[in-house]
Amino acid sequence: MNRGDAGKFALVLGAVGLSCVLWLRAAPDTELAPAKAVPVATPPPAEFVQVRETDAQGKLTEVKTMQKVVKTDADWRKLLTPEQYKIARGKGTEPAFCGRFVDNHMDGVYSCVCCGLPLFESTAKFDSGTGWPSFFRPICEENIAEHVDRSHGMRRTEILCARCDAHLGHVFDDGPKPTRLRYCLNSAVLVFSPKAGAAENSKSEH
């Protein structure tokens, strides 16, 4: 290579080097650039329901907006007996004529075993002859939820506690007046609170 060629080669190398420097200055510094923030999933808003409770005198309150009672499966198992869990959370059914409230005739209120929401009153209880506690209306419409149940090859209307979704039983259209409805419940999902002064052998069923 003669002196002239060497000079040309040096000029080419210099131009290439200058181009590289300019490109590096213009290119973003990926190592030093701040990492993009990863969006954090926002939990869904808690579900609320409008239900009624009972006061100290056993009377229904005005409609209240409150958060639904939601627990893990493990928490429900700790809170409930195996029979209560099987029926309330597993949608099971207790044997006919075996529930403790089938022949209960005391005046009082029946509440949800899972969350304590009042569900039915003794004034609406009647002897259906089916072997399960039966009522012709709930204590109030807000406290009962209804779902279509297509299990076991049938189409029925399932009834649940509106505050915690506990399975209570089913409602049928073969009840007495004035509603012609029969709310068929499982004793295991109910807690009974007798009214003050209620007699043990009171016959208050219709």
Image: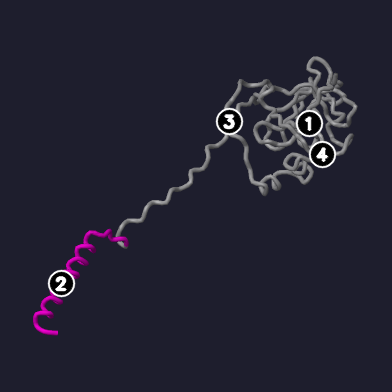
Distance of mark 4 from mark 2, alpha carbons? 85 Å
User: Which badge, 4 or 3, is on the more N-terminal residue?
Assistant: 3
Q: Which residue is mark 4?
A: 152
Distance of mark 1 from mark 4, alpha carbons? 10 Å
Residue 9 relative to residue 140: left or right: left
Distance of mark 3 from mark 1, alpha carbons? 29 Å
> Which residues are drawn in magenta?
1-30
Q: Which residue is mark 2?
A: 14
Q: Is residue 144 magenta?
A: no
Q: Quadrant of residue 16?
A: bottom left
| In the rendered image, the vertical position of residue 15 relative to residue 160, given as above or below | below
Helix, strand or loop at mark 3: strand
Helix, strand or loop at mark 4: helix
Of the residues shown, which amino acid type is indicated by label 1?
Answer: Arg
Helix, strand or loop at mark 2: helix
Bin the neighbour count of mark 2 within 10 Å (Cα to Cα): few under 14, some 14-19, many 20 and up: few
The numbered mark at residue 31 is none
